[in-house]
Image (cartoon, rainbow, N blue to C red):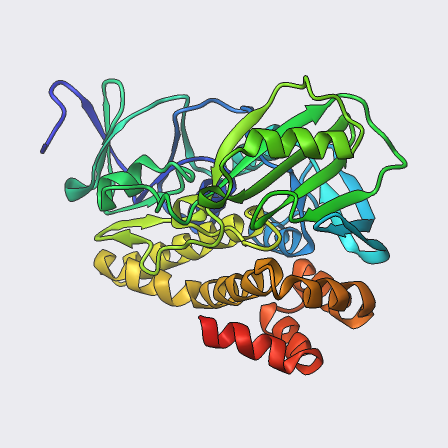
Amino acid sequence: MTSAIGAHTRHFDLIVIGAGPAGAAAAQTAAASGLRVALVDKRQFPRAKLCGGGITGRAIGHYQRIFQGRLPDIPLVRCQEVAFFAFGEDLGLTKGVPPLYLGMRYALDAALVRQALASGAQDFTGQNGTLDPENGALDLNGTRLVAPLIIAADGVNSPTAKLLFGQAFDRDKIGFALEVEHPEPDPSAPLRIDFGAAKWGYGWRFPKAAGMTVGLGGVMSRNSDMKAALASYLDRLNLPSNLPVKGQFLPFGDFRNVPGRGRVLLAGDAAGLVDPITGEGIGHALHSGELAALAVIQALSTNQPTRALQLYCAGLRPIHKALRHARLLRNIMFRERLRPAFVRSFRSSRTLRGEYFRMMSGETEYGPLMRHMATRLPGFVLRVLREN
């Protein structure tokens, strides 16, 4: 396809497909640098999105750098107490942790889109299109957008990834999550994480300004009945089982080593950048969108758009390294014969918990956490290393 018959053509430096955190960060970064940016999404904002809405210190740091604001201008609940459970065992309440912020994704994403548009990105939200990657074009209703580079941040079910690679994700490795919104807020309820509420996954209860978000997610191939697992989890929390349920695939760290092809770069969930331990996707989405845009800026500055993907891959190396470490730690946590040692260690070691929260706050990465575990349980960790 070389052109859409009768379409009006508009030229840009960059087309961003998907206006969630990754796409908004990419559009903001590129537009603020002076590039002509088209921001496209099939939905209009605000729109509903399955997500616990946990915004870690790491995510806040990326937001502050990219959007130059202290916090997103949306209702947020600030938490510094976390109740941990693992496989039905109470691991205790941890107080004084680095702040975690909890908000609704429909409000967060809409705020990020507004900021990206205010920085100069052109608004093409609420429009669906057909991508022509060979010609750097996106055909909308009567309009053909053309650019030397495209960033696709179109989610875990990414039509762009499917077009480039034949599938958006590997079904044997993908995660799946179910979530409900409880409309009654409980100010006394701490943020709660339940490792093992789903097989090779976790459950969450996140207090919000207007209620609670409760859900669970796990590796899909290991969970034959996720609905039953959710019902059991709601019962454990003394919550009604008749709340409307939302479901979504979750790319649990099953990232693409080369997130893109040719002049198309994948970011956020479309690139598989979700932490398999914490489930955090917002922080990596923001950062990857920024990194993709910076690669585009650098490649266009030297009139070498085909270098953008190589530059982007180089920028992603620290994120990929952290996700590899997280996948290794997940093996330690969820292998049945190794599980008791992990539970004992996490319950008894304040230092280990401290490293976990420092990692979530963006002060450190998984490497120090793994090293600390190795010093406590060297044989334990060595067995996992040999199995991988």
| Side (left or right) of 46 relative to 231 | left
* Corner quadrant of residue 158: top left
Query: Residue at the front extreme?
Result: 337
Count of numbered circles in the view: 0
When the figure is inspected, residue 11 is found, relative to residue 257, above or below; the finding is above
Image x and y of residue 332, in percent: 59, 65
Query: Which residue appears farthest toward the right when viewing the image?
Result: 188
Q: Measuring 27% from the left and 24% from the top, which residue is drawn there?
A: 140
Residue situated in front as seen by the camera: 233 or 311? 233
Quick one: quadrant of the C terminus?
A: bottom left
Residue 70 visible from this viewpoint: no
Q: Is residue 76 left or right of residue 159?
A: right
Q: Nearer the viewer, residue 135 or 246?
A: 246
> Which sits in the foreground, 163 or 333?
333
**Residue 178 image point, x, y percent:** 57, 32
For image coordinates 54% across by 44% down, the residue present is 218
- 144 or 93: nearer the viewer: 93
Query: For residue 127, what is the image quadrant?
Result: top left
The percent position of residue 223, horizontal first and vertical second, equals: 51, 40
Work out which quarter of the rendered image holds the N terminus and state it.
top left
Q: Would residue 48 be visible to someone looking at this image?
A: yes
Q: Residue at x 45, y 63 (%)?
A: 320
* Residue 62 pos. (x, y %): 59, 54
Residue drawn at x 57%, y 60% as measured from the top left? 335
